[in-house]
Image: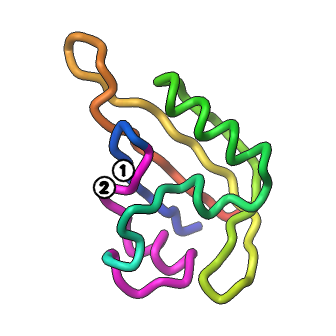
């Protein structure tokens, strides 16, 4: 099963995404996602809040089942994992994320 990968800055905005995640979301170019983060594509308010709150607190999200809103208006069920990557002094530098179709 193909896996969507992303990195987000400490602010939650995408820094990098792989081709699979671009395709899952229905976009052709990385520039189309400028200023967005994974939470912007989560349909369920509770899931959005869980991801946003965890990232704001420097915490991990593991195995969150939710739904992505696609560019064309479609939806796809996913499982998302997000983990903070910290500097040696414990400050969150960025987040690594994995998105799998459910």
- Earlier in the chain: of badge 1 and badge 2, it is 1
Residue 24 included in the magenta stretch of the image: yes
Question: How far apart are the alpha carbons under marks 1 and 2?
Answer: 5 Å
**Residue 91 position by quadrant:** top left
What is the secondary structure assignment of the residue under circle 1? strand
Labelled pair 1, 2 in contact (Cβ < 8 Å): yes
Q: Quadrant of the N terminus?
A: bottom right
- Which one is nearer the viewer's eye here, 60 or 32? 32
What is the secondary structure assignment of the residue under circle 2? strand
- Residue, x 54% and y 28% (percent of image)? 60
Q: Is residue 7 left or right of residue 102?
A: left
Label ID, residue 48: none
Name of the residue lying farthest toward the top = 89
**Residue 84 position by quadrant:** top left
**Residue at the disc numbered 1:** 7
Magenta range:
12-30
- Residue, x 79% and y 43% (percent of image)? 46
Q: Is residue 94 left or right of residue 101?
A: left
Residue 27 included in the magenta stretch of the image: yes
Q: Position of residue 2 (x, y in %)?
A: 53, 68
Q: Quadrant of the C terminus?
A: bottom right
- Which one is nearer the viewer's eye here, 92 or 80? 92
Q: Position of residue 62 (x, y in %)?
A: 63, 35
Q: Is residue 10 above or below residue 30?
A: above
Q: Is residue 56 left or right of residue 78?
A: left
Mark 2 surroundings within 10 Å by alpha-carbon count, few (fewer than 14), some (14 through 19), many (20 or more): some
Q: Position of residue 14 (x, y in %)?
A: 38, 56
**Residue at the disc numbered 2:** 15
- Residue, x 33% and y 75% (percent of image)? 30
């Amino acid at each position: 099963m193909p896996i969507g990968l992303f990195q987000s800055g400490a602010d939650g905005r995408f820094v990098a995404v792989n081709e699979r995640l671009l395709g899952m979301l229905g976009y052709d170019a990385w520039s189309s996602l400028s200023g967005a983060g994974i939470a912007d594509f989560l349909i369920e308010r509770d899931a959005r809040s869980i991801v946003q709150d965890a990232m704001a607190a420097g915490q991990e999200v593991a195995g969150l089942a939710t739904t992505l809103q696609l560019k064309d208006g479609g939806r796809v069920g996913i499982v998302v994992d997000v983990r903070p990557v910290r500097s040696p002094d414990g400050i969150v530098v960025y987040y690594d994320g994995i998105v799998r179709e459910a």
